[in-house]
Image: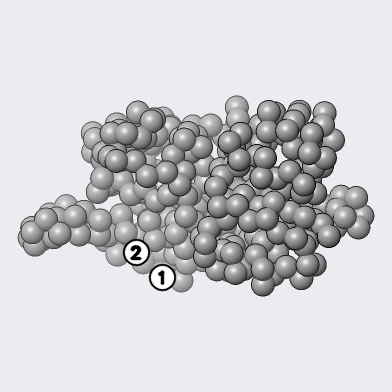
């Protein structure tokens, strides 16, 4: 029987791994993230399945190769933690899940944006401290009078755009190669989007050297002082230091993010206090709460999305077993 060791399995996901296992794979479900400390749990397996925060660097891949494992697949979109040079050298195939329920991340981005737009986090922070006054800073327009800018109008960006459009907002989008059939958005250049939007939401991949700090101080300077920035893509896509400084200087209205820098050092970890977070820029950013809302990379964490991620991963394995290559092999 084909055996798969699956890392980073949360308790609520266990039933789905079994219910969706129509090919009757032998499953070794491991709660912890893949690391040098637990890679031995994969010994005796034919393949591994990881998630975004697992270590798939050269040393881990060499150990897996020594176990005879030639498939190291991820059930996430991102593959930035894979050492592809090592994988190619060792003959290890890599596959991912390029698409899953678009509503999952789109809904979280929308909720972060609308929460900051209507100053809900600021108001609840005050009321929970006993201050029930209506502060001037709560004064807001309504979403159907606002403009929302979507940077990256692919599947996820378009799904979020439709949520805003359903509420009557004007939705601009920047896309390097606009889809003329996409009627959920009004395509524009980046400068126009930044200058006119009340909420800017980012849905672009992290490509080192290309999309790092795509939104930095020059871009923030073009935005309204009251504008809300939302990032559910990847931490390095935004210059977090520039965001933190702009919030402090009141030249940016708020920031909602589901991603941070150095996520491998913080994901699924509980710190005694914010001061124990290892990245100083992340700490400075989060100290700007309630104008900064940080969620723990939970955009994918819905039943439909996780179902898609597991099902597609199983199809990747079955295709590789039968035809020698996965449905969604990672091109590089």
Residue 156 in view here = yes
Residue 143, numbered circle: 2
Residue in view at x 62 percent, y 45 percent: 78
The local crowd at label 2, few if under 14, some if 14 to 19, many if 20 or more residues have their Cα within 10 Å, is some
Callout 1: SS: loop
Q: Measuring from the top left, give residue 84's x and y in whole percent.
A: 74, 32
For this view, does 65 lie left or right of residue 50?
Answer: right
Q: Residues within 10 Å of mark 1 (few under 14, many from 20)?
A: few
Q: Position of residue 138 (x, y in %)?
A: 18, 57
- For residue 48, the mark is none
Q: Is residue 131 left or right of residue 239?
A: left
- Assess whether mark 1 and mark 2 are in contact (beta carbons under 8 angstroms): yes
Residue 328, position as x, y percentages in the image: 77, 52
At horizontal 90% and vertical 50% (from top left) the residue drawn is: 324
Q: How many marks?
A: 2
Considering the image in quadrants, where does the N terminus appear? bottom right
Q: Residue at x 68, y 28 (%)?
A: 59
Outermost residue, right side: 323
Disc 2 on helix, strand or loop? helix
Task: Where is residue 15? Give x, y as percent.
Answer: 60, 69
In the picture shown, does residue 324 fall above or below 140? Answer: above
| N-term-proximal mark, 2 vs 1 | 2
Q: Please name whichever residue, 112 or 194, is drawn nearer the observer in this view of the structure.
A: 112
Q: Is residue 145 left or right of residue 164?
A: left
Task: Report, in whole angstroms, how far the alpha carbon at label 2 lies from the one at label 1.
Answer: 7 Å
Placement of 255 over or under 126, stated as above or below? above
Quadrant hosting residue 114? bottom left
Instruction: Name the residue carrying label 1.
Output: 167
**246 w.r.t. 268: above or below:** above
The residue closer to the viewer here, 168 or 70, is 70
* Residue appearing at x 48%, y 38% in the figure: 263
Q: Position of 325 compared to 74: left or right? A: right
């Amino acid at each position: 029987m084909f055996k798969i060791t699956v890392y980073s399995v949360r308790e609520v996901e266990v039933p789905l791994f079994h219910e969706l296992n129509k090919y009757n794979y032998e499953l070794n479900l491991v709660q912890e993230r893949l690391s040098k400390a637990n890679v031995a749990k994969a010994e005796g397996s034919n393949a591994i399945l990881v998630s975004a925060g697992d270590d798939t660097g050269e040393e881990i891949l060499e150990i897996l190769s020594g176990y005879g494992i030639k498939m190291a697949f991820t059930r996430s979109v991102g593959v930035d933690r894979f050492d592809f040079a090592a994988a190619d050298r060792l003959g290890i195939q890599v596959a991912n899940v390029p698409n899953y329920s678009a509503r999952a991340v789109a809904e979280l981005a929308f909720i972060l944006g609308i929460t900051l737009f209507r100053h809900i986090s600021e108001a609840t922070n005050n009321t929970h401290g006993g201050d029930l006054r209506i502060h001037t800073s709560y004064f807001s327009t309504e979403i159907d009078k606002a403009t929302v800018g979507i940077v990256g109008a692919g599947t996820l960006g378009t799904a979020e755009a439709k949520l805003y459009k359903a509420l009557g907002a004007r939705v601009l989008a920047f896309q390097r190669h606009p889809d003329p059939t996409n009627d959920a958005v009004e395509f524009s250049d980046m400068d126009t989007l930044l200058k006119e939007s009340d909420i800017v939401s980012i849905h672009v991949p992290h490509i080192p050297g290309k999309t790092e700090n795509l939104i930095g101080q020059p871009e923030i300077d073009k935005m309204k002082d009251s504008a809300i920035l939302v990032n559910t893509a990847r931490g390095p896509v935004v210059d977090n230091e520039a965001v933190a400084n702009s919030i402090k200087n009141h030249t940016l209205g708020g920031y909602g993010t589901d991603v941070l820098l150095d996520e491998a050092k913080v994901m699924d970890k509980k710190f005694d206090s914010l001061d124990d977070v290892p990245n100083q820029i992340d700490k400075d950013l989060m100290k700007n709460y309630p104008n900064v809302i940080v969620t723990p990379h939970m955009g994918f964490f819905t039943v439909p999305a996780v179902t898609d991620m597991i099902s597609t991963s199983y199809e990747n394995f079955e295709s590789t077993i039968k035809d020698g290559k996965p449905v969604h092999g990672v091109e590089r």
